[in-house]
Image (spheres, rainbow, N blue to C red):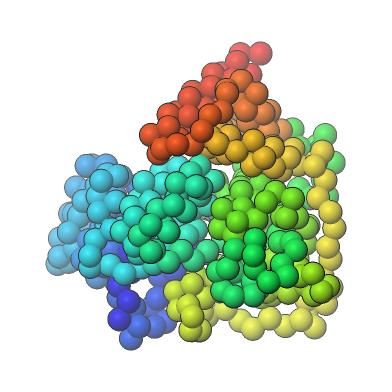
């Protein structure tokens, strides 16, 4: 019986994870669940999965959850805050941690799971973007097993010659081909994007996801973050990672080899496939996802990305090449800009301007410690907020 902690249980990935777990009660039990503010959803999950512990964001949310659980006679221990998240991620009673909190908030608990040597199922790409070297060092030192949940990285993992080998030294690997749907605005003229609404940006043509990553998909910053994520997970240089637009989202990514072979992983776009793969690895379990009907898909298209239409992609490649804390600056500025867009404070095309301004303004340094990374994260957030305020004053 594998005992699972889900960080971010109420989100899109969290809910898909619970869906897979519920199909295999003989293999998995839920040790702990976390949410930030969606207390009622978390209470319903506690009623179904009976975790020993549940963590929320604030004391008020904890009191509300406690009352809901008591009314149902549930004995789940309720806690709140970052220290509690780190505790459920590293507790001796859990074997596997699904890291599915969105954004920089996921860094500390994901790192705690890695340091404790857990099997870490990594959805929270921002943690790796911010502190890739430190995170990978923690994984190697503790002997943690890191399995990618992001569909592209999970596909690459499946297509590499020996599971989880690194690109340098892996037999014959020449390139990682990271597929991107291009999001909802792939075929829109750039000039028409000034007036798009948050709901339009979140309407992804192929994947159903949380709002932050949906906006990232529309700007293609999601792909940019994934390029950096692939660099750390697989040890591939920026030159060894190529982004390929593939609007059908059926090929989830590919690995090309020196003999001309290109290996791909295909499937219906549903996150339960990579989640089931990582949960059961190296075995396979049913995920609830329908088998792919290639005749029904009919056509698979591929094209090169347009870096002028999607400046966020270029910014991410620049940050990867700059190294050090540059990706942390990029990530923080992006989080602030996306939140401002979702709140209606800036327009869609101002997102990349905010990020570019922060990257220009702030010097990046060495990502020597988590404290150094978090300091840069804070500076970037403040700079981004200042620039957003100045844009609004214009
Ligand atoms: P959602 O927004 O749907 O869910 C986020 C989860 O994190 C929720 O449980 C939320 O709680 C919790 N949360 C939000 N803010 C905080 C905070 N400050 N502290 C603690 N917990 C918090 O996101 P997704 O599920 O879409 O994405 C989660 C992660 O997985 C992201 O890093 C994303 O990039 C990555 N990912 C997602 C994919 C997808 O298909 N959705 C695909 C690949 C990667 P509450 O519900 O209470 O707000
Ligand atoms: Mg992805």
Q: Seen in the image, is 382 located left or right of residue 297?
A: left
Front residue of this view, candidates 370 and 27: 370
Q: Where 287 sits versus 316, above or below? A: below
* Quadrant for the N terminus in the image: bottom left
* Quadrant for the C terminus in the image: top right
Quarter of the image for residue 91 reads: bottom left
Percent coordinates x, y for residue 240 in the rendering: 73, 55
Q: Residue at x 25, y 54 (%)?
A: 87
Percent coordinates x, y for residue 36 in the rendering: 35, 48
Q: Where 215 sits versus 167, above or below? A: above
Front residue of this view, candidates 290 and 26: 26
The answer to whether residue 347 of the structure is visible from this angle is no
Percent coordinates x, y for residue 339 in the rendering: 53, 36
Q: Residue at x 31, y 69 (%)?
A: 95
**Number of numbered discs on residues:** 0
Quarter of the image for residue 250 reads: bottom right
Q: Seen in the image, is 97 located left or right of residue 383?
A: left
Q: Seen in the image, is 220 located left or right of residue 8?
A: right
Q: Where 385 sits versus 187, above or below? A: above
Q: Seen in the image, is 60 located left or right of residue 260?
A: left
Q: Where 272 sits versus 10, above or below? A: below
Percent coordinates x, y for residue 25 in the rendering: 34, 82
Q: Residue at x 82, y 38 (%)?
A: 308
As drawn, which residue projects farthest toward the bottom? Answer: 26
Q: Residue at x 61, y 81 (%)?
A: 290
As drawn, which residue projects farthest toward the front? Answer: 169
The answer to whether residue 318 of the structure is visible from this angle is yes
């Amino acid at each position: 019986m594998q005992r699972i902690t889900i960080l971010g249980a109420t989100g899109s990935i969290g809910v898909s994870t619970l869906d897979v777990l519920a199909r295999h009660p003989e293999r998995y039990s839920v040790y702990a669940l976390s949410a930030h503010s969606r207390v009622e959803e978390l209470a319903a999950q506690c009623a179904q999965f009976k975790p020993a512990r549940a963590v929320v964001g604030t004391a008020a949310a904890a009191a509300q959850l406690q009352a809901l659980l008591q009314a149902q006679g549930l004995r789940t221990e309720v806690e709140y805050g970052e220290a509690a998240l780190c505790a459920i991620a590293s507790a001796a009673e859990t074997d596997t941690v699904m890291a599915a909190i969105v954004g920089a908030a996921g860094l500390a608990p994901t790192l705690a799971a890695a340091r404790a040597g857990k099997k870490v199922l990594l959805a929270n790409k921002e943690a790796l973007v911010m502190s890739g070297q430190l995170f990978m060092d923690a994984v190697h030192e503790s002997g943690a097993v890191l399995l990618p949940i992001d569909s592209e990285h999970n596909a690459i993992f499946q297509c590499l010659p020996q599971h989880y080998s690194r690109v340098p030294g892996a037999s014959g690997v020449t390139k990682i081909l990271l597929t991107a749907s291009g999001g909802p605005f792939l075929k829109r003229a750039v000039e028409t994007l000034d007036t798009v609404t948050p709901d339009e940006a979140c309407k992804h043509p192929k994947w159903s996801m949380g709002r932050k990553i949906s906006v990232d998909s529309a700007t293609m910053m999601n792909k940019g973050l994934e390029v950096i994520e692939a660099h750390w997970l697989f040890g591939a240089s920026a030159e060894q990672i190529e982004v390929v637009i593939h609007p059908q989202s059926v090929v989830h990514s590919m690995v090309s080899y020196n003999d001309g072979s290109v290996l791909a992983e295909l499937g219906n776009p549903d996150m339960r496939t990579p989640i089931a793969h990582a949960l059961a690895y190296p075995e396979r379990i049913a995920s609830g996802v329908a088998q792919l009907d290639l005749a029904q898909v009919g056509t698979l298209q591929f094209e090169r990305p347009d870096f002028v239409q999607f400046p966020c992609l270029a910014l991410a490649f620049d940050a990867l090449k700059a190294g050090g804390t540059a990706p942390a600056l990029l990530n923080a500025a992006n989080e602030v800009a996306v939140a401002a867009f979702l709140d209606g404070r800036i327009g869609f095309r101002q997102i990349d301007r905010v990020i570019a301004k922060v990257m220009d303004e702030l010097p990046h340094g060495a990502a020597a410690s988590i404290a150094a990374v978090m300091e840069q994260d804070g500076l970037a957030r403040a700079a981004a907020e200042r620039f957003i305020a100045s844009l609004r004053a214009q």
